[in-house]
Each structure stands twice: as C-alpha cells, then as structure tokens.
C-alpha cells in the first residue's frame, strides 16, 4: 500500500484541473465525420491498412473548424481529426443568424465553391462536405454549388474560406470609413 495522500492512484492533478472544465466549455460543440479513407500498403506478411478521417467541428452558433487525422485504426484517426479541428476554430458572422450576407465564391486547389444567400425557409441546399460545414456553422438558409474537384478535403477548405470571406454591411462601413445606403431598383 503506497502513501499517495488524498488523491487516488490514477488521478493526476492535470486531469483533475483541466478535464471537467474543458467538457463544460465544449459541451455545445458537435463533430461530424465527413470522410474516412482507407489506404493499403502491401508488406512481406500481407496488407497493412491505415485510415484517414476528415472531421468538421462546430457549435451551430457561428463557430466552426475542421481537422484531418491519420492512424492505423479508425477511432484514433477520428480522435486526431477532432483534436485538429478544435485548434482551427473560426468565427463566422451570419445575417439574422440564418444565412450569409452576400454571394461569395472561393477556390481551394481544383475545388471551387459558390455560396448564395437564400430567403427564410429555403433550407440548406448543399452537398455532403459543404452541408457539414454550413450546418455546424449555424447556417440555415443558403444555396450552394461546387465546381471542379469534389475532393471532400478541398471542398471543406474552400467552404471555410468562403465563409471567412463574407463581410457584413457594418464591417464594410467600418473598413471603408463611409456610410452605405440601401439601393432599391
């Protein structure tokens, strides 16, 4: 019997201090696995499989990120991807907490994504990779189109780039130092 004091044997001060607090802060965040890829290496004894996972992580309130992880088994690849996604979280400014401010087009590699704002009730018209990013960012009404490559990793990166490129009217006024007026045709 060892004398450990009030702590139990498996309990470290690090785990006690940071473990529960992080769970409380991140409780409203969700993760969505977009793609799991299996690759094979042929060795002398047979085939060796390795896996990669693409995960989108967000809180449906304007904060979203993605991660990519590789491992020899699926659960640890997903775990690595979630860890990377938590480090790459970005805030997205939404119009009326439901759509984007203006039409935006972004390219990453050969993947090109176009996002168009939509009226209330339209819903999310998007493919799997774009839908995962937009849903976890909190976008409810938007039209999308992918051109070129449909590689999920590049589509996710292009979608996040497009969301970061959107600007609100107030932000444009502040950057330009002028007041913008509505133009009705």
Image (cartoon, rainbow, N blue to C red):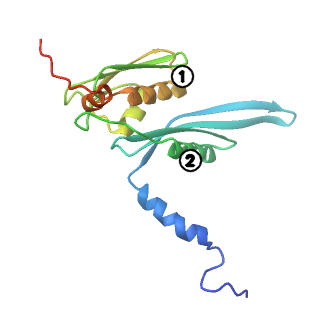
Residue bearing the label numbered 1: 151
Residue toward you, 14 or 120: 14
The residue lying furthest to the right in this view is: 44
Residue 8 in the image: x percent, y percent?
62, 80
Q: Residue at x 28, y 27 (%)?
A: 177
Residue 172 in the image: x percent, y percent?
29, 27
Residue bearing the label numbered 2: 83
| Dot 1 or dot 2, earlier in sequence | 2
Which secondary structure lies at badge 1? Answer: loop
Residue 24 in the image: x percent, y percent?
42, 61
Name the side, left or right, on which 144 lies relative to 6.
Answer: left
Q: Residue at x 48, y 65 (%)?
A: 20
Name the side, left or right, on which 175 lies relative to 68.
Answer: left
Q: Quadrant of the C terminus?
A: top left
Name the side, left or right, on which 71 lies relative to 169.
Answer: right
User: Cα distance, mark 1 to mark 2?
Assistant: 22 Å
Residue toward you, 113 or 121: 113
Say whether residue 182 is visible.
Answer: yes
Q: Relative to residue 122, is residue 27 depicted above or below?
A: below
Q: Residue 1's quadrant in the figure?
A: bottom right
Say whether residue 129 is visible.
Answer: no
């Amino acid at each position: 019997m060892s004398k450990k004091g009030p702590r139990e044997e498996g309990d470290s001060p690090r785990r006690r201090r940071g473990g529960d607090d992080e769970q409380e802060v991140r409780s409203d965040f969700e993760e969505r696995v977009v793609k799991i890829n299996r690759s094979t290496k042929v060795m002398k004894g047979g085939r060796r499989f390795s896996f990669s996972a693409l995960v989108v992580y967000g809180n449906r309130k304007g904060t979203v990120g993605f991660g990519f992880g590789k491992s020899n088994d699926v659960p640890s690849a997903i775990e690595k991807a979630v860890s990377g996604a938590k480090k790459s979280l970005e805030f997205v400014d939404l119009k009326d907490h439901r759509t984007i401010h203006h039409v935006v087009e972004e390219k990453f590699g050969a993947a090109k994504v176009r996002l168009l704002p939509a009226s209330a009730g339209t819903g999310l018209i998007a493919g799997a990779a774009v839908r995962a990013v937009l849903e976890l960012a909190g976008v409810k009404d938007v039209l999308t189109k992918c051109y070129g490559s449909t590689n999920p990793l590049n589509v996710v990166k292009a979608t996040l780039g497009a969301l970061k490129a959107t600007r609100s009217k107030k932000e444009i006024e502040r950057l330009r130092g002028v007041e913008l007026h509505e133009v009705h045709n």
